[in-house]
Amino acid sequence: MTPASSAAAGTVHISRVDALEILDSRGRPTLQVAVTLARGARGVAGVPSGASTGSKEATERRDGDRSRYSGLGVLDVLCAVHGEIADLLRSRAWRDLAEIDAALIELDGTPGKARLGANAIVGVSMACACALASAEGRELWDWLTPPGVAPRLPVPHFNVINGGVHASNPLDFQEFMIAPLGAGSLPEAIRAGAEVYGALRDLLAGRGHGTGLGDEGGFAPRLSEPEEVLYLLTAAIDQAGYIAGPGGVAIALDPAASEFRGDGYYTVAGQRLTSADMIERYAEITQRFPVWLIEDGLAEDDWDGWEALTERLGRKIQLVGDDIFVTNPAIIREAISRGVGNAALIKVNQIGTVTETLEAMAICRRGGYAQFVSHRSGETTDTFIADLATGAGCGELKTGAPARGERVAKYNRLLEIAAAEEHLPYGLARD
Ligand code: PGA
Ligand code: ZN
């Protein structure tokens, strides 16, 4: 039984649904969900949480009780999992994950999963996926592979410089990533990421910059101009002994521009810029530096700007929609029809179920859009996304720096899959 295939393998019964309030990597409460099938298979999932969220993301529910965790507790969400959700899941036999996810959506009854909480629903959906895969004795990545899709090990995108809402430095752009596009294998890519990260630390320290870290494990030096960071990053790639560019280690950016747009202008290092100015700036950046991907270069409500950006740079680089598409199948369909961007960021908790996530990825595939699987700034040691990126064969995954346990857990899971499955190719899906 694959995630959405029907009956062939019969039905399953769920006997237990447990949830626990645990901490995420930022010290905030989140959920861990465990689902046990009647025949004993068990799946466990940790729920991630974002900071620079798109306004149309599924709703993350919090207690709002200021006397606990500044209102961020998830005890009410936990009650929903133990109560209504567990009652529903134990009440009948299930054909597949698609049927479970559809029933969860119906039980919630709101468009954004606001009643029960998308954090409850996504945790249950992920844990069910893990339990169903385990019941079949299959690796999660294999079980998640859609029919007709070739799985592959993704290019890890290591976020090595943090800014925006992920750090307290004056850097407006949120993420500066290194992507070993030219590596010959996944282990070589992980090694390149770690070596460049080390070279960057030495370079920053040698120039008197701080080497403290932001939320995703990247350094957070007190720099404000994106070009200055790109210069240092290119130098670090070089010093680590790699070629800076698509044949070696390329650079990817997530400015997360919704966060620095207000009253129609973007503010970068104190300068007020229009959409057209931003596009010009990106065009120059891609000429001067080996930047192969820009995510959320413009804000989520700037669709006209996005159209112009795609017109200008869409043939040269990958333009990924995160806040603007929020892993939402309907929005991605609209984007494809309008020619906005050429890739979608894929975050399971942005839409709230595994089935809808796979649907969003299928729509991208059919529309010729790349899919870039992503962690959140608030993470647990859950490794679901490493399996998702591999199984869906999209060839791209970002999950932070090659440092800090919650980020490294995903990269280590990729290493584990690579070691066990020597036949899996590595690299971008277009190869
Ligand atoms: P978030 O940011 O997880 O804090 O929302 C990640 C991103 O913008 O890609
Ligand atoms: Zn983003």
Image (cartoon, grey):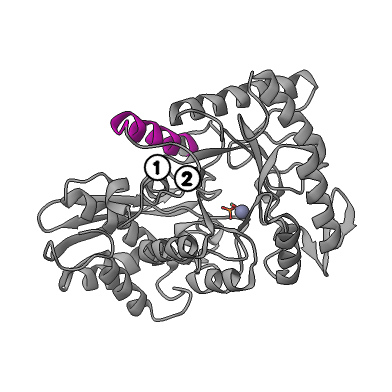
* Mark sitting earlier along the chain (1/2): 1
Magenta region, main secondary structure: helix
| Residue 170 visible in the displayed image | no
Tell me the quadrant of ligand 2.
Answer: bottom right
| Extent of the magenta region | 407-422
Which secondary structure, mark 2? loop
Residue closer to the observer: 220 or 69 = 220
Residue at image x 71%, y 55%?
Answer: 297
- The kind of residue tagged 2 is Gly
Residue closer to the observer: 171 or 81 = 171
Whether residue 334 is in magenta: the answer is no
Query: Which disc is residue 395 wearing?
Result: 2
Query: Which disc is residue 152 wearing?
Result: 1
Q: What is the distance, in whole Å, between disc 1 and disc 2 at their CAs?
A: 6 Å
- The kind of residue tagged 1 is Arg
Residue closer to the observer: 209 or 80 = 209
Residue at image x 71%, y 63%?
Answer: 299
Query: Which disc is residue 24 wearing?
Result: none
Residue at image x 52%, y 60%?
Answer: 368
